[in-house]
Amino acid sequence: MDLLKLLRDRDAGWVRITFAKNYSYELKDVIARVGLPGGPSDLRRISQEQAIDTMTRILWRDLAYRKELIAEEGAHQSALTFVNEYASADAEFYNNLELSGDSSAWFPVSDSTFDLCLLIVNKDSAVCVLAEDDD
């Protein structure tokens, strides 16, 4: 996966992708190692399918104005590739968005007006994607 192309294609706001070793740390330690402020209460454990959906949301539209940055199908394919490439079979997935039916709750993890985070925690590594936008 060409991460630089991915970042260039998402031409809005800021995106930070952080990789870190995981020496069986607790979630709070993994969060600190990838540079996220806050703690585990800011994140929700999600399924692999929801992780792909989160990454699609990060790539597809800017967070402030919902302007399409990458065609939805292309964003989904890139998200699928990203999650499959960086998640092991026993990975745990987290984000800062809770979707339930027609309602949602968002838990900010940065000082930006809008942000969306995907954290993939493997047994020996972690990767965090944080997209931020300001209004």
Image (spheres, grey):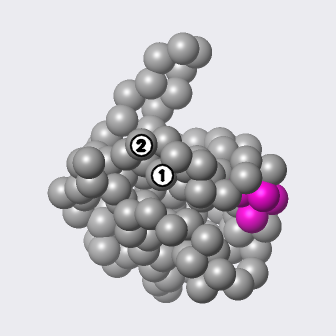
User: Can you name the residue that lies furthest to the left here?
Assistant: 111
Q: CA distance from mark 2 to mark 1?
A: 6 Å
Q: Which of the two residues, 126 or 64, is positioned nearer the viewer here?
A: 64
Q: Quadrant of the N terminus?
A: bottom right
In the rendering, at what x and y percent does residue 15 appear? 44, 70
Residue linked to disc 1: 62
| SS class, disc 2 | loop
Q: Which residues are magenta?
A: 74-78
Residue 59, image x, y percentages: 60, 58
> Could you say which disc has been placed on residue 85 in the image?
none
Tally of numbered discs: 2
Q: Residue at x 43, y 47 (%)?
A: 63
Q: Is residue 35 left or right of residue 84?
A: left
Query: What residue sits 71% from the left and 68% below the top?
Result: 82
Q: Main secondary structure of the magenta part?
A: helix
Discs 2, 1 touching: Cβ within 8 Å: yes
Q: Is residue 77 visible?
A: yes
Number of other residues with Cα within 10 Å of mark 2, as a class: few under 14, some 14 to 19, many 20 or more: few
Which amino acid type is shown beneath numbered disc 2? Tyr
| Image position of 81 with respect to 3: above or below | above
Q: Residue at x 19, y 57 (%)?
A: 111
Q: Position of residue 77 (x, y in %)?
A: 80, 59
Query: Which quarter of the picture shows residue 117?
Result: bottom left
Which one is in front, 35 or 122? 35
Rendered position, 132 above or below 113: below
Nearest to the observer: residue 82 or residue 88: 82
Question: Is 57 on the left-hand or right-hand side of 108?
Answer: right
Residue occupying the far top of the picture: 102
Give the percent coordinates (x, y) of residue 23.
Answer: 47, 81
Q: Residue 32 sits in which quadrant?
A: bottom left
Q: Check residue 65 in the rendering and tell me which mark sits there, or answer none.
A: 2
Q: Residue at x 73, y 48 (%)?
A: 72
